[in-house]
Image (cartoon, helix red, strand yellow):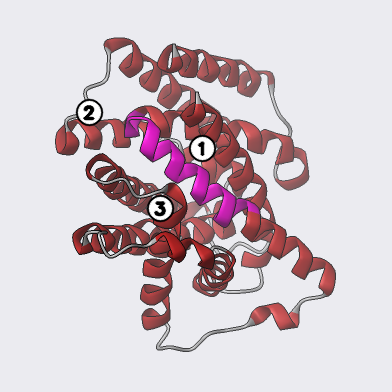
Amino acid sequence: MIGILSAFGAATSWTYACFIWRSQTQKYKSIDINLIKNIIAFLIFLPAFINLSSTTELKNIFILLISGIIGIGLGDTFYLKSLQTIGTRKTLSIETLSPLMAALSGEFFINENLTTKSWFGIIIVTISLFIILREGNDFKEENSSFSEKNKFKIFAFPFLSVLCAVLGGLLSRMVFLQSNLSPFLTTEIRLLGAIIFLISLKGFKINFFLKNIDKNQQKRFFISILLGTNIGIFLQQVVFKTLPIGIGWALLSISPVISLFFAKTEEREITKKIIFFTCFLFFGLTLIIL
């Protein structure tokens, strides 16, 4: 039950945070936003290192650092770039292909065999989200540099984000299966890995863009970091610790449904078809949980 509640909490926190981040992606580079949010989140969770003991295997620390580089450093950068080009709901819809990829990776790499019912639920979720995505075929948005001719590039960013997120989650799950590290500590180690990678990629130059935005926007950005990075990644780690990765990702995949609350603000009207397949998606999630 803790894993299920954590998944719903993580999805809610992440969805609201990315809605705020998208307003920043129109002004600043995705890599700059990702780096700043990770540095601030890392400083907030800094006390987590108190729990780091000499008995902690270096192998597990190394795996978590790689997990942070792939899942947070690369994954979140692709994610923010996708928000910039196609918007929150469409990005989250494509991201929800991750349960199928996660279930397959869990079965192939760490022998997490799911029941037939769970597989059926994951397929229902995937089909529902595909149709929800097809319903919104208007990719061109204000301030977007991508047109209908660039659909391949548009889909590349969220797909790469999915791939990186699943690989990062798989590595975290592997660490939890072979150690007693807490979600709190693993979150901080992953953030550290992402920061080292992004700073190196930037040539050790940090764009402190927060000083260029008003106090209202600064407050919203800090709230988004607390929700999307600190609370979101921490709850995600709880999910990886307590649930098989395929089931965990399926529960985390309710983000597109949550993003429908922002649809009128950000993109378009919610149609009856979207409502129907959203309900179908929840049916799939029910099969996975029960």
- Tell me residue 163's x, y (percent): 33, 49
Q: Point out which mark residue 112 bears.
A: 2
Cα separation, mark 3 vs mark 1, equals 12 Å
- Predominant secondary structure in magenta? helix
Query: For mark 3, what is the residue?
Result: 161
- Element type where label 3 sits in the image: helix
Q: Nearer the viewer, mark 2 or mark 1?
A: 2
Query: For mark 1, what is the residue?
Result: 93
- Tell me residue 65's x, y (percent): 31, 64
Give the amino acid at mark 2. Glu
Give the amino acid at mark 3. Ser
Evaluate whether residue 268 shows in this view.
no
Cα separation, mark 2 vs mark 1, equals 25 Å
Q: Which residues are magenta?
A: 227-246
Q: Residue at x 77, y 45 (%)?
A: 265
Can residue 231 be found in the magenta stretch?
yes
Cα separation, mark 3 vs mark 2, equals 23 Å
Task: Report the side of 132 relative to 290 (left or right).
Answer: right
- Element type where label 2 sits in the image: loop
Give the amino acid at mark 1. Ser
Task: Report the side of 122 relative to 223 (left or right).
Answer: left
Q: Residue at x 41, y 17 (%)?
A: 288
Q: Point out which mark residue 164 bears.
A: none
Quarter that holds the C terminus: top left
Evaluate whether residue 62 shows in this view.
yes
In front: 245, or 82?
A: 245
In front: 35, or 280?
A: 35
- Element type where label 1 sits in the image: helix
Can residue 289 be found in the magenta stretch?
no
